Image (cartoon, rainbow, N blue to C red):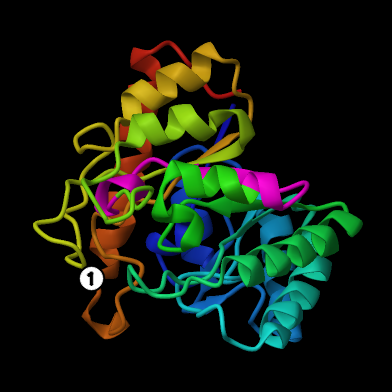
């Protein structure tokens, strides 16, 4: 097991992200955004400079946190957009030696409306195959997408999309209603979700929070192990089962990644909380006698 993190929650410039990573004593970061732009969207010359910067710092990138099929894209969006993202991501991942990319299954439609399941399956099959042909693993995250409706929906993706693997986020079930029934019911249980899908999980995101006051309301994010994400229980189970992949922090405690007005963000607070979050995760891992390698 090794540790990494979405360092764009610590800072916008890559240099500061690297600084936060080294402050934790880590040698990996999960590539998502630099100066507010995703790694597969920055201009080619910008990416080349970023890659050189990572090399010079001795920082490796085990995961691309892509925008592919994410909660910001509807299933009726032009699939050519997705294909272009894939075609930009692959050579950049190859340049960095990155073998895992986080994908999603497109935005959730309101409950009771047509979800276009077959089109989602078709698109994910092509995504997974394109990445597999390049020697890259595509892993679906249980976020605000079709697969995040419930553990049963995620397993359906596994059945319908050959070769698909999973990223499991401990915090995401806490603020999503379980939509495996005919009508939305209670909030999802993070450990029950994990237990159902864990055999297909190749990467773990650590986030923790409290149930929202209502559907559609942003949850209150907490330090790892202090919310309802069953973080410690999931980590202990992962250890017991011999999990040997990466664990990535995605704090959200200082600023929610989805915030639109970045001018309102206190980036020093973000940097400090990111480092604190990583240290608190390390403390949790020490409690269960599971040390990073």
Q: Quadrant of residue 75?
A: bottom right
Give the quadrant of the N terminus.
top right
| 181, 231: nearer the viewer | 181
Relative to residue 287, is residue 133 drawn left or right?
A: right
Give the quadrant of the C terminus.
top right
Task: Where is residue 277? Give x, y as percent.
Answer: 32, 42
Label 1 secondary element: loop
- At x 65% / y 72%, what residue is drawn? 119
| 38, 110: nearer the viewer | 110
Relative to 49, residue 51 above or below: above
* Direction left: furthest residue: 213
Give the total number of marks visible in the rendering: 1
Task: Where is residue 85? Give x, y as percent.
Answer: 70, 78
Residue 212 included in the magenta stretch of the image: no
The residue pinned by badge 1 equals: 266
- At x 47% / y 79%, what residue is drawn? 36
- At x 33% / y 68%, what residue is drawn? 111
Range covered by the magenta-colored residues: 158-177
Relative to 93, residue 242 above or below: above
* Direction front: furthest residue: 182
Relative to residue 52, is residue 213 drawn left or right?
A: left
Residue 167 included in the magenta stretch of the image: yes
């Amino acid at each position: 097991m090794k540790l990494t993190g979405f360092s764009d929650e610590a800072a916008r410039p890559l240099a500061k992200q690297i600084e936060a990573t080294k402050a934790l004593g880590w040698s990996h970061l999960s590539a998502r955004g630099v100066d507010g732009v995703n790694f597969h969207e920055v201009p080619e010359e910008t990416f080349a400079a970023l890659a050189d910067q990572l090399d010079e710092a001795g920082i490796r990138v085990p995961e691309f946190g892509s925008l592919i099929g994410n909660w910001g894209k509807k299933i009726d969006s032009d699939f050519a957009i997705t294909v272009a993202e894939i075609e930009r991501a692959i050579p950049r991942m190859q340049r960095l030696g990155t073998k895992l990319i986080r994908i999603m299954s497109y935005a959730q439609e309101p409950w009771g409306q047509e979800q276009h399941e077959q089109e989602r399956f078709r698109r994910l099959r092509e995504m997974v195959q394109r990445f597999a042909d390049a020697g890259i693993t595509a892993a679906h995250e249980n976020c605000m997408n079709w697969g995040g409706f419930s553990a049963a929906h995620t397993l359906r993706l596994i059945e319908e999309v050959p070769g698909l693997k999973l990223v499991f986020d401990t915090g995401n079930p806490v603020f999503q209603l379980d939509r495996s029934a005919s009508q939305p019911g209670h909030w999802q249980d993070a450990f029950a979700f994990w237990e159902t899908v864990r055999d297909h999980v190749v990467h773990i995101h650590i986030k923790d929070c409290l149930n929202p006051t209502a559907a559609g309301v942003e949850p209150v994010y907490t330090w790892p192990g202090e919310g309802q994400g069953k973080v410690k229980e999931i980590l202990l189970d992962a250890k017991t089962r011999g999990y040997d992949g990466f664990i990535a922090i995605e704090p959200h405690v200082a600023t929610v990644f989805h915030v639109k007005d970045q001018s309102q963000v206190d980036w020093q607070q973000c940097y400090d909380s990111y480092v604190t979050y990583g240290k608190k995760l390390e403390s949790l891992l020490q409690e269960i006698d599971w040390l990073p390698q």
